[in-house]
Amino acid sequence: MTNVLPKAAFVLSVGVLGFAYGFAAEAWNLFPRAHVEQAWRQARAMYVSSSRHFLSNRVYDRSGVRVEASSRVQPGLTLLTSWWKEGGEWDMEARLIDREGAAVHRWEVEGDSLFPDPAKDQPYIHGSHLFPNGDLLLNIEYAGTVRMDACGAVEWTVSAGNHHSIERMADGTFWISGLADGRRQGSDRYPDGYPGLDLVFVDQLLHVSPDGTVLDTLNVLDLLYDNNLQRHFIKTGQSRGDVTHLNDIEPLSPEMADEYPLFEAGDLVVSLRNIDLVFVVDPDTREIKWSDSHPFHAQHDPDFTGDGWIGVFDNARDFRGGTMLGGSRIVALRPHTGATEVRFPTEQSDRFYTPAGGKWQELDNGNILLVEARAGRVVEVDSAGRTVWEWVKEPEQESKVAEVLGGTRVDLKKEDVHAWTCSDTESSAPSK
């Protein structure tokens, strides 16, 4: 017995010291925290890739195109981003489809070769912009942005943890969601750490030129703290990890700016999903001019829609597959008057719910194009909320469906696409 107690005490003391040092390593970035985090991120990337996390439970018992009112469908082609399984292998692609669902053009994307860092590479496309000549901008989630021509030749890449949205300014530049490398406790403005937060991922607003040059970077946490909006972390209980989850940046166009008394052309409306926050910021002064978090939960894709309104894709994520809160919806807010209204769904609308992902687009004929991401569905509804056209992803083994994170109606005809030619680019330009 006398020999056992000293051994037990020694083992216990080693355990306590190990725990204490592990806590200190995590808190103050001591060895080997960086190595452990890198190993964890690589393991997670391998797990994500092998587990095919882009597959969700199938919701609809149909697939392909359903046209309910052909005369009320907005003309054009639809750009989709998802995964397709052909020959037993999954391929990440962007596709243009016609009204009948036939593929008019395809861009295959090799994420591993574009952004080989396994700590960043995520196996799905999130965010796109199509140029009239067939060039395409794509975000490979949390890895980077690529511009490729109509034939898939890479023109340039930007690797800055780019993710989610790509939105074009009137001057031809772009605002792209980005992520600083690694978890952080602070920034140049807050060198001692963000008060109340631990190690966090820091989202960034990236201003990018048409040739892939990063023109400016806005730190999201700096913006929140500088504008006294850190209370939202308290309200949602977020203090470490992915505390903001930036998922969209939308610029106010000069043509529409006069309709917004509180804002000016070039101001940005920004969505932070994990704290249910939407705000408008001046990217030059860094002043947040307006914010709201009340009418939505886990939202996406705020857009300036005219006449002072901002429309938001409210996921309304709940515990019961959309039945608790009534499903996802489009909520419109008018900052200068405080008015709020629900524009979709209506009593005439079909079921619609996605707990994550999701986009919406106002069309020229007054219809709305909606992306029900987790269900693998893109649907067009008229001004009364009635379905006029839908496309549903084909199922995998009858029970799963690949997520569709992008669905955009573009003003193109088949003959426009057939006239596209390829550039002379043979390989990727150096990453910036």
Image: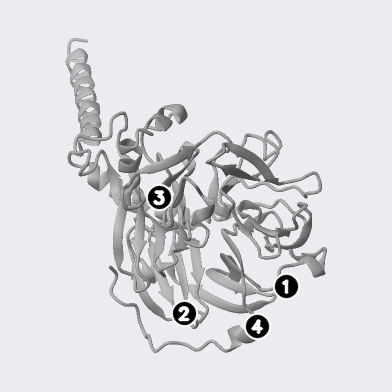
| Residue shown at 25% from the left, 27% from the top | 19
Q: Is residue 178 left or right of residue 323?
A: left
3D distance between C-alphas at marks 1 and 3: 39 Å
What amino acid does circle 2 point to? Gly
Task: Say whether marks 2 and 3 touch (CB < 8 Å).
Answer: no
What amino acid does circle 3 point to? Arg
Q: Specify the label residue 414 is tagged with.
A: 4
Secondary structure found at label 1: loop
Q: In this view, does 276 lie to the left or right of 40?
A: right
- The residue at which mark 2 appears reads as 152
Q: Specify the label residue 44 is tagged with.
A: 3
3D distance between C-alphas at marks 3 and 4: 41 Å
Q: Which colour scheme is used?
A: one colour
Crowd class of label 1 (few under 14; some 14 to 19; many from 20; radius 10 Å): some
| Residue shown at 18% from the left, 10% from the top | 2
Q: Could you say where residue 300 lies in the image, as x and y percent from the top left?
A: 54, 48
Crowd class of label 4 (few under 14; some 14 to 19; many from 20; radius 10 Å): some
- The residue at which mark 1 appears reads as 99
Q: Could you say where residue 341 lies in the image, as x and y percent from the top left?
A: 66, 41
Residue 102, relative to residue 322: is it above or below?
Answer: below
